[in-house]
Image (tube, helix red, strand yellow):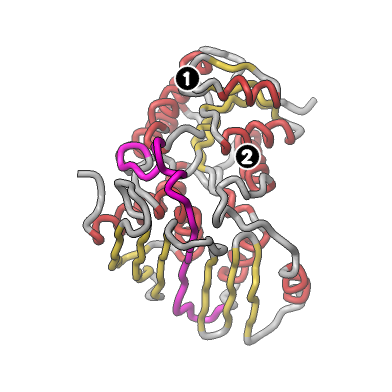
Amino acid sequence: MMRKWTIGVIGAGSIARVHAQVAGQLPNATFAGCCDGGSGRAKAICGEFGGRAYADYDAMMADASIDVVMIAAPSGRHMEPAVAAAKAGKHVLCEKPLEITTDRIDAMIAAHDKAGTYLGGIFQNRFTDGVRHLRKAIAQGRFGRISYAGVYVPWWRPQSYYDGTWRGTWALDGGGALMNQAIHMVDMLCDLMGPVVEVKALADTLGHTIEAEDTAAAVVRFENDAVGLIYGTTASWPGRPRRFEITGTQGTAIYTDDRLTVWEFAEPQPDDEAIVKGMQTSHRTGGAADPKDISSEYHRRNLAAFLEAIEQNKPFELDGREARKSVELILKIYADAHIGKA
């Protein structure tokens, strides 16, 4: 008989609702409930998807039936429940960023290492077909010598998105456009291109009244000597699709939102025709102007891969150490741009 993993969600915002939804879609998982910070939204989510509205995350940790905790709380409040879950013997799959400082991330990793439980990150972009094709092409050397890779997130958020919330604060968001919105593409860069050895950056708050940056740009050099760019903003009306570009001496590819839009190589392969055909598939805007305009399919794949790793007692491809890389790079960009929490 297939084991059913019982999943609790910490947080009750829009992304917590997505987690509740996908937990109920997997054949080997069930949504047990969620908790909030006193907003009452947990009861609404449980009313829609079933499960129990827990008073707080301590009550969830005390429930022996919970196997896996998914953390979807404000970014600067991930460490405490993640460590508590490890002490309670529960696995954790945590929303991006894993936390807002590397010290807090390291505390999460250490707690789960000690407990022997799994700690994974949520970067659903890694589980799209387009990224799978890119990863394979890079491994095969199809781009030749890679000369450049860059990510662009020209998004828009109105001032109302920030007003009266934790968003854009150093204490709970850990930054602005890079740490919250562009981090998915920064993670993609870390995943596909490897370590960054040099950073030159500028950042400012140009279109909103918030503590952190709403616009940032950085020039980077990778360990493989290729150069790159990172651009992220929430001050670009009306908001355009995010994209990843990679080019080298033998090929060029562009990935826009959740699909490939350019796929050109000096030496074509039989699979290229099917990949190019798939490029015509329609897609959502990926949150360019509306943070709710995202597909839940890749969150489902992210969770499914996490549970598979636990079941097979194998390393999870997006474990705590892997999810740490994007935060480390963003903090280097902040440091070079001379911004950050005092």
Residue 277: percent from left, percent from top: 77, 72
Identify the element where label 1 is drawn. Answer: loop
> Which residue is drawn at the image coordinates 56% and 70% (left, top)?
138
Please name whichever residue, 65 or 180, is drawn nearer the observer in this view of the structure.
Answer: 180
Q: Quadrant of the N terminus?
A: top right
Q: Check disc 1 and give the amino acid type.
A: Gly
Viewer-nearest residue: 62 or 9 = 9
Q: Which mark is residue 38?
A: 1
For the residue labelled by badge 2, is the local secondary structure a helix, a strand or a loop?
helix
Does the residue at mark 1 contact the one at mark 2 (Cβ under 8 Å)? Answer: no
Among the 4 quarters of the image, the one containing residue 276: bottom right
Q: Residues within 10 Å of mark 1 (few under 14, many from 20)?
A: few
Image location (x, y in percent) of residue 279: 71, 69
- State how far apart marks 1 and 2 are (Cα): 26 Å
User: Which of the numbered marks, if any, corresponds to residue 303?
Assistant: 2
Q: Amino acid at mark 2?
A: Leu
Q: Which residue range is magenta in the image?
A: 143-172
Q: Quadrant location of residue 9?
A: top right
Q: Residues within 10 Å of mark 2 (few under 14, many from 20)?
A: many
The percent coordinates of residue 160 (x first, y second) are 45, 44
- Residue 158 shown in magenta: yes
Q: Is residue 315 magenta?
A: no
Q: Residue at x 38, y 69 (%)?
A: 222
Residue at image position (59%, 17%) is 53
Please name the residue shown 53% across and 17% down the image: 60
Q: Is residue 85 left or right of residue 141?
A: left
Above or below, 17 against 57 in this view is below
Q: Nearer the viewer, mark 1 or mark 2?
A: 1
